Amino acid sequence: MAIQPYAAGYGHFRHTILAELLMQWKDPTWQHGALLPFIVGFLLWRRRGQLAQIPASSSSWGLALIVLALFLYYAGFRANNFYCGYLAIMTLIAGASLWLDGGQRSRARLFAWLMLGFMWPLPFLEESIGYQMRLLMVKSTGFVLNALGIDSLVSGTALQSMPDMALGRKAGDLFSVGIAAPCSGMRSLFALLVVGALFSYFRQRLMWRRVALFSLILPIAIVANMMRILVLIFTAMVVGQQWAIGDAETEVSAFHEFTGIVVFLVALLLLQLASWLLDRSFGGQGFKRSRTVSRQVVAPVL
């Protein structure tokens, strides 16, 4: 990763996978990737006692995965494609775990391995679904404003107040918001996937509950980002467009930047609410049941 020149990306010269990661991690959309090796290290460290109790073994499937990983790595090198390299490294880690430590220990590390998948930047997702997210945000926010009695006009990916001839207001006098790519929710979505996965893992102990809670991340991210846009619009209506949002052609306001935390606060509140509803609807015994099952599984090993 650090030494072998691998692909050119958008340039003319090949550079290493590590160099590509460090470059992509400078983008706010993928900054969370730099934290994932430390998060995964913590997840493995906290389960070191359980892993030590599981006997080491070996699986021939691991060797097969290692061979597949080497093929994928070479294919990505020949195709000048970083994504094949990312997949090859993930496959190599899984194969090495199976081959050297066996299936039981590998299953115990499965969540940490899945979390490591969030480390890799996937900018093609921004291009493929980013614009659709922008349209969704502007249409849904406009719908909410109109439902609240605040007449708004949707134009492409822009949202502005309707003109009011009686009060002498032109279109956009109360507020005018352009839903640019950073405001589409894509930037916060990938970080929220990491937060949601960790929250689901630590908050719930039954697998189906973890999956159910994690599956809510996308709609929660959309709602949380909509709340941020609504906060910006309402603030612009009260104290003015320049202070609340700023000048889109030069720079955004400090308040605009600060409201980014609203997305994560609302998302965490909604995740906690969803988790509480799961406990309320299906009983709060998920942790106890999981511990009982774990003891029954570990007992024969001990």
Image: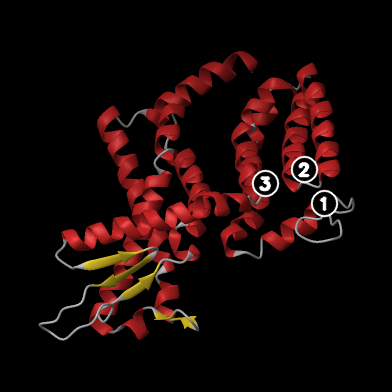
- Give the residue type that dot 3 points to: Gly
- The local secondary structure at tag 1 comes to loop
Residue indicated by mark 3: 41
Image quadrant holding the C terminus, namely: top right
What's the amino acid at mark 2? Gly
User: Mark 2 highlights which residue?
Assistant: 85
Q: Residue at x 72, y 31 (%)?
A: 94
Residue at the farthest left position: 166
Give the mark, 1 or 2, whose residue is nearer the N terminus: 1
The circle on residue 142 is none
Front residue of this view, candidates 246 and 41 = 246
**Distance of label 1 from label 2 (alpha carbons):** 9 Å
Q: CA distance from mark 1 to mark 3?
A: 28 Å
SS label for mark 2: helix
Judge whether 261 appears above or below 69 on screen.
Answer: below
Whether tag 1 and tag 3 are in contact, CB under 8 A, the answer is no
- Depth order, front residue of 104/71: 71
Q: Is residue 210 above or below residue 181?
A: above
The residue that appears at 89% across and 53% down in the rendered structure is: 3
Please state which amino acid type lies under the numbered disc 1: Ala
- Residue 202 visible in the displayed image: yes
Q: Earlier in the sequence, mark 2 or mark 3?
A: 3
Q: Is residue 70 left or right of residue 86?
A: right
Farthest residue in the top direction? 300
Nearer-N-terminus badge (1/3): 1
Q: Position of residue 228 (x, y in %)?
A: 35, 65
- For the point 73% across and 43% down, the residue is 86
**Along the horizontal axis of the image, is 53 left or right of 244?**
right
Tell me the mark number nearer the camera, choosing from 1 and 3.
Answer: 1
Residue ID for mark 1: 7
Image depth: mark 1 or mark 2 in front: 1
Q: Pointer 1 and pointer 2: residues touching (CB < 8 Å)?
A: yes
